[in-house]
């Protein structure tokens, strides 16, 4: 029997929690929550939770204080990004020992391209080598493209193997809600419901023109493509390229003065500029995230008039404006889009005056001005999107 081309999606189960449990074996079987400084008395959010903690309703992105209320017996640990990155690299190296093409998709996941007549056997070999080399468990989805493989992984969790192809895609997916699809979130689900589309099957049969009218000429028809399970088959071994860089700061005390918010955004924009300079790629879009008390998050963005190259114009360091509340929880923020090490933004870092820094600061302050500050602010973030990743224009 001739080999067939398959895509496998590997997802490390409860990755961050699993790394911490491997470092602290006495915590195996206990509800473990990782995030921030590991202190639920301080502000911060959950980076990940063990399955035991998830059983109590704890999940990623939840405030640590809420996690403690839901699971008082949980063990809270601080995030250790360098440790997770080191383990991730070991996992990817182990996968490359197999006869597959490895495309890294983040700390805890990768796509594998392979030619085989027994993809389940290969998937089991994947699980075995990850366990043997790294002591971690993983789930493996098998598909005839990336979308179906990644979707299959959701059915395989935890620690299983599942195949999903064109032949059984609609029988498996048609009755499920649209957010069962990779790339569709809760806001899109609400908008689809306004069109009386509440299942994947209905979305697959939806009128293209009606979808384009509601979601735009690109995204509308694309949602229908997702519903059919159509997608990219190519798995490339090229290094992962970040789509953006970002910085976020959670404040121990809420910001109540607009001037303090302006100063914090200026500093964040300068630190994002440092990351952009290190990346060496032009920026096309700037976004600002504001989390108002108690926990309402809003994001707005703008496209720059033209992409800005990261060329320094003044090598002299400039002291950033001080921000009175002490920034905490560096892990809650991060360099979005690359699935890798989050960035911190401590007050002692050196900020350089650059052309891209000036542009990011101006744009970020402009976007910040579009928010109505009628409530205290507990988090601010600035994101720069690289030119290659920008698919639209105008205001967001």
Image: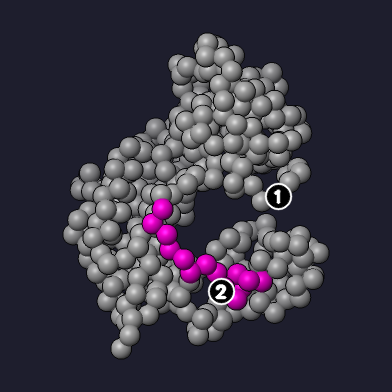
Crowding near the residue tagged with mark 1, few <14, some 14–19, many ≥20 C-alpha atoms within 10 Å: few
Residue 296 location (% of width, % of height): 64, 41
Residue 228, picture quadrant: bottom right
Compared with 95, 25 (above or below) is above
> Which numbered tag is attached to residue 44?
none
Q: Nearer the viewer, residue 233 or 58?
A: 233
Is residue 76 highlighted in magenta? no
The mark lying in front, picked from 1 and 2, is: 1
Is residue 237 highlighted in magenta? yes
The CA distance from mark 1 to mark 2 is: 24 Å
Residue 180 appears in the rendering: no
Residue 214 location (% of width, % of height): 78, 63
Nearest to N terminus: mark 1 or mark 2: 2
Q: Left or right of 168: which side holds 385?
A: right
Compared with 319, 26 (above or below) is below
Q: Which stretch appears magenta?
A: 224-238
- Residue lying at 76% horizontally and 60% vertically, measured from the top left: 216
- Residue lying at 64% horizontally and 79% vertically, measured from the top left: 201
Q: Left or right of 94: which side holds 285?
A: right
Indicate the secondary structure of the residue bearing disc 1: loop
The residue that mark 2 highlights is: 229
> In this view, which residue lies farthest toward the left?
132
Q: Left or right of 249: which side holds 37?
A: left
The residue that mark 1 highlights is: 392
Indicate the secondary structure of the residue bearing disc 2: loop
Residue 90 location (% of width, % of height): 26, 50
Which quarter shows the C terminus? top right
**Magenta segment, principal secondary structure?**
loop
- Residue lying at 40% horizontally and 65% vertically, measured from the top left: 9
Which quarter shows the N terminus? bottom left
Residue 307, picture quadrant: top right
């Amino acid at each position: 029997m001739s080999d067939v081309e398959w895509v496998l999606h590997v997802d490390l189960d409860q990755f961050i929690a699993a790394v911490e449990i491997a470092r602290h074996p006495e915590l195996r079987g206990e509800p473990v929550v990782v995030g921030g400084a590991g202190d639920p008395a301080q502000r911060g959010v959950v980076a990940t939770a063990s399955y035991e903690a998830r059983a109590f309703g704890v999940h990623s992105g939840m405030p640590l204080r809420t996690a403690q209320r839901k699971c008082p017996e949980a063990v809270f640990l601080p995030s250790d990004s360098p440790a997770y990155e080191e383990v991730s690299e070991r996992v990817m190296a182990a996968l490359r020992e197999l006869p597959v093409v490895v495309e890294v998709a983040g700390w805890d996941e990768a796509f594998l391209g392979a030619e085989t007549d027994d993809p389940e056997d290969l998937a089991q070999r994947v699980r075995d080598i990850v366990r043997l080399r790294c002591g971690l468990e993983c789930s493996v989805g098998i598909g005839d493209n990336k979308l179906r493989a990644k979707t299959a992984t959701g059915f395989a969790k935890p620690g299983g193997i599942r195949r999903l192809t064109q032949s059984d895609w609609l029988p498996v997916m048609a009755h499920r809600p649209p957010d069962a699809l990779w790339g569709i979130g809760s806001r899109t689900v609400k908008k689809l419901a306004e069109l009386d589309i509440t299942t994947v099957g209905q979305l697959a049969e939806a009128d293209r023109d009606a979808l384009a009218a509601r979601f735009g000429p690109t995204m509308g028809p694309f949602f229908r493509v997702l519903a059919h399970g159509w997608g990219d088959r190519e798995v490339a071994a090229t290094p992962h390229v970040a789509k953006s860089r970002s910085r976020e700061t959670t404040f121990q005390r809420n910001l109540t003065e607009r001037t303090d918010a302006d100063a914090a955004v200026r500093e964040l924009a300068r630190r994002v500029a440092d990351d952009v300079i290190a990346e060496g790629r032009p920026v096309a879009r700037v976004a600002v995230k504001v989390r108002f008390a108690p926990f309402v998050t809003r994001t707005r963005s703008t496209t720059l008039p033209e992409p800005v190259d990261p060329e320094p114009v003044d090598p002299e360091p400039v002291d950033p404006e001080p921000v009175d509340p002490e920034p905490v929880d560096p892990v809650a923020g991060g360099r979005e889009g690359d699935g890798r090490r989050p960035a911190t933004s401590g007050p002692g870092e050196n900020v350089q005056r650059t052309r891209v820094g000036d542009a990011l600061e101006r744009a970020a302050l402009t976007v910040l001005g579009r928010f109505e500050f009628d409530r205290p602010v507990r988090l601010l973030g600035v994101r720069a999107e690289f030119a290659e990743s920008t698919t639209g224009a105008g205001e967001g």
